[in-house]
Image (tube, rainbow, N blue to C red):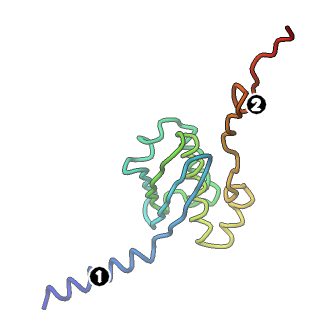
Amino acid sequence: MAEENIQENVEEIKQDKQQDVIWATGRRKRSIARVRLILGNGEMKVNGKPLDEYFDRPTSRLVIRQPFNTTNLLGKYDVIATVNGGGKSGQAGALRHGISRALALTGQEIKTALKRKGFLTRDPRKKERKKPGQKGARKKFQWTKR
């Protein structure tokens, strides 16, 4: 009898936790970030590591926290993110985009504030491909007259 009650309580808790999770995807350059926001105390994990351990540059950490600082929600949500592709700078931008999209789902006022700062706009800039007969994407081989 007691085991059945415990099992029912555990299932109710699982359902409650699933309802509080907000999923979003952010992209920047070649990086993709899948973000989960859960009501909590502000703990951030990226690929299973704490934020400060994964992103060693302070500028990257600042970029990632910008959506929370803009909306005054720093410390209200736990972030669990999976990031792959690109470099650390692109990953930080993708994570910011994902967090912003997830926060935008919580309310219209928050969405307006994030949109005004430009955090909901995906940065379309990517590395340009190398062209044949050239040294790089834009740079040409040295031209000699004779």
Residue 105 vertical position relative to residue 53 in the rendered view, above or below: below
Q: Is residue 123 left or right of residue 101?
A: right
Instruction: Identify which residue, 56 or 93, lies in the foreground.
Output: 93
Q: Is residue 62 left or right of residue 139?
A: left
Residue 57 vertical position relative to residue 11 in the rendered view, above or below: above
Residue 40 placement (x, y as % from top left): 43, 64
Q: What residue does disc 2 label? A: 138
Instruction: Identify which residue, 116 or 46, lies in the foreground.
Output: 46
Residue at image position (54%, 64%) is 24
Please report whichever mark, 1 or 2, sits nearer to the chain's N-terminal start. 1
* Residue reaching furthest to the front: 146
Residue 116 vertical position relative to residue 60 in the rendered view, above or below: below
Dot 1, crowdedness within 10 Å: few (<14), some or many (≥20)? few
Residue 87 placement (x, y as % from top left): 53, 39
* Residue reaching furthest to the bottom: 1
Quarter the C terminus occupies: top right
Under circle 1, the secondary element is helix
Q: What residue does disc 1 label? A: 11
Residue at image position (48%, 51%) is 83
Q: State the image quarter where residue 113 is shown.
A: bottom right
Quarter the N terminus occupies: bottom left
How many angstroms separate mark 1 from mark 2 (CA)?
59 Å
Residue 88 placement (x, y as % from top left): 52, 40
Q: Amino acid at mark 1?
A: Glu
Dot 2, crowdedness within 10 Å: few (<14), some or many (≥20)? few
* Residue reaching furthest to the top: 146
Residue at image position (69%, 39%) is 128
Q: Amino acid at mark 2?
A: Arg
